[in-house]
Amino acid sequence: MRYQIQGTTLPTLDVYLTQGEAVYTESGGMAWMKGNIQMDTNTKGGLMSGLGRALAGESIFMTTYTCTKGDAVITFAPEAPGNILVRQLAAGEHLICQKDAFMCAESSVKLEMHFRKRLGAGLFGGEGFILQKVTGPGTVFLEIPGEVREFDLASGEVMRVDPGHIAVFEPSVSYDIAAVKGLKNIFFSGEGLFLATLKGPGKVYLQSLPLANLAAKLAHYIPTKG
């Protein structure tokens, strides 16, 4: 399966399919398509799988697009300004992603809910207890608001991050929440009460534009009814 990403701030993803190849996305995720393509919409894995995906920010129903003859192309567009992250996953390899990060994937990739087990990480981690998990084999495309920075943490190496900036991380990375120390830091730094602690080994993908930050900024310019 070939693909091409075009554009900058608001990119589009073209996925090129040959006969028998398939890609799936959430309901309404496709922008346009060309060629002999068959659409099949279902809960993909059953109702409980669909409900789990809904808790993780996606739709209950997923649509699979299969090329039935010759060549075809399907185009996907992100829901917010940002970047499209592409990962080729081996069999059994998986990633932990923020809510609503999933864009589309080969039909062999599994998308499911990921539940944070640690109480602190769930309550104060910015995204709550429910995240997304994608498992290979196959290619997955993730939409990340803002620019994406990739860090490869060595074993025992630690980063402290504002939780809203965490987009994707490998399951080998330990994720926890720690309180900010010092009263002046808590009340005047603007960073909130908690920071995420990421401990290697493994890859971490951070985003420059958490949607919650953008929404809070825009709210100042939206007139309220007096």
Image (spheres, rainbow, N blue to C red):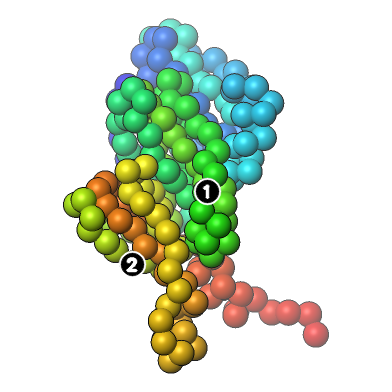
Secondary structure found at label 1: loop
Q: Relative to 209, is 200 above or below?
A: above
Residue 119 point in image, percent of width and height? 55, 57
The residue positioned 51% from the left and 21% from the top of the image is: 65
Alpha carbon separation for disc pair 1 and 2: 19 Å
The crowding category of the residue bearing disc 2, from other C-alpha atoms within 10 Å (few below 14, some 14 to 19, many at least 20), is some
Q: Nearer the viewer, mark 1 or mark 2?
A: 1
Q: Which residue is mark 2?
A: 160
Report the quarter where the N terminus lies.
Answer: top left
Task: Please say whether residue 197 is visible from this viewpoint.
Answer: yes
The disc at residue 73 is: none
Q: How many marks?
A: 2
Are discs 1 and 2 less than 8 Å apart at CB?
A: no
**Residue at left offset 47%, top offset 27%:** 110
First reached walking from the N terminus: tag 1 or tag 2: 1
Question: Circle 2 sits in a helix, a strand or a loop, which is it?
Answer: strand
Residue 187 x/y as whole percent: 49, 88
The residue at which mark 1 appears reads as 117
Instruction: Pick whichever, 209 or 178, lies toward us.
Output: 178
Residue ID at (47%, 50%): 98
Quarter the C terminus occupies: bottom right
The image quadrant of residue 92 is top left
Horizontal and vertical percent for residue 135?
41, 30
Farthest right residue? 226
